[in-house]
Amino acid sequence: MTEVEIPVDTGDFRLMDRKVVDVFNSMPEKNRFIRGMISWVGFKQIALFYEREERFAGETKYPLKKMLQLASDGILSFSFKPIKWIEATGLVVVVLGTLLMLYSGITWSRGTVSSIPGWLWLLVLLSGIHLLALGILGEYIVRIYDEARKRPLYTVEKEINIEQGDDKHDR
């Protein structure tokens, strides 16, 4: 669902190279969905599988509400698909409203007019236009949000044959 490939069954605990930590810390976001952010940085990752024993005592302190919040953070931070869905729904409803308008016009021209299809197509068409407009506005807001996060444009994993202090190339 996200634009970033997030490994399945990962937690927020992990071992990281200093370079990954530095890039992660350079991201000034306040809503930090760590699993997605680490995947977004793009460095190589490997999973270490282990057997986890049953909880010794008590119950989890992570209730359903917090799990839903975590899922929401992941979707809203790393996926623009909900906005695309709103936009697509608006487009479908506009097409449906247009078809109802045509149907209403045909029934009117045949003299079998009913006021219900006339009002229905208007209502559906306007609702579709509103949803489509909401989706387009959402696209702009998503782009503004993406810029406001101030994530680095790219990360350098490795430098090869780079000499430090070469003044002729600094100009």
Image (spheres, helix red, strand yellow):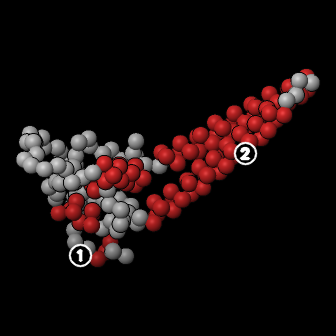
Q: Position of residue 19 (x, y in %)?
A: 21, 62
- Earlier along the polypeptide chain: callout 2 or callout 1? 2
SS state under label 1? loop
In percent of the image, x 17 and y 49: which residue is there? 59
Q: Which mark is residue 103?
A: none
Q: Which residue is mark 1?
A: 165
Residue at (53% x, 42% y) in the render = 85
| Rendered residue at 28%/56% (across/down) | 34
Badge nearest the viewer, 2 or 1: 2
Disc 1 residue type? Gly
**Kind of residue at disc 2:** Leu
Work out whether residue 154 or residue 133 is closer to the camera in this orientation and state it: 133
On the image, the x and y values in percent for residue 117 come to 79, 32
Label 2 crowd bin: few (<14), some (14–19), many (20+), radius 10 Å: some
Q: Which residue is mark 2?
A: 126
Vertical position of residue 142 compared to residue 88: above or below = below
**Does the image show residue 108?**
yes
Q: Nearer the viewer, residue 56 or 164?
A: 56
The Cα–Cα distance between marks 2 and 1, rounded to whole angstroms, is 63 Å
Residue at (30, 45) in percent of width and height: 6
Image coords of residue 138 (percent x, y) = 56, 54
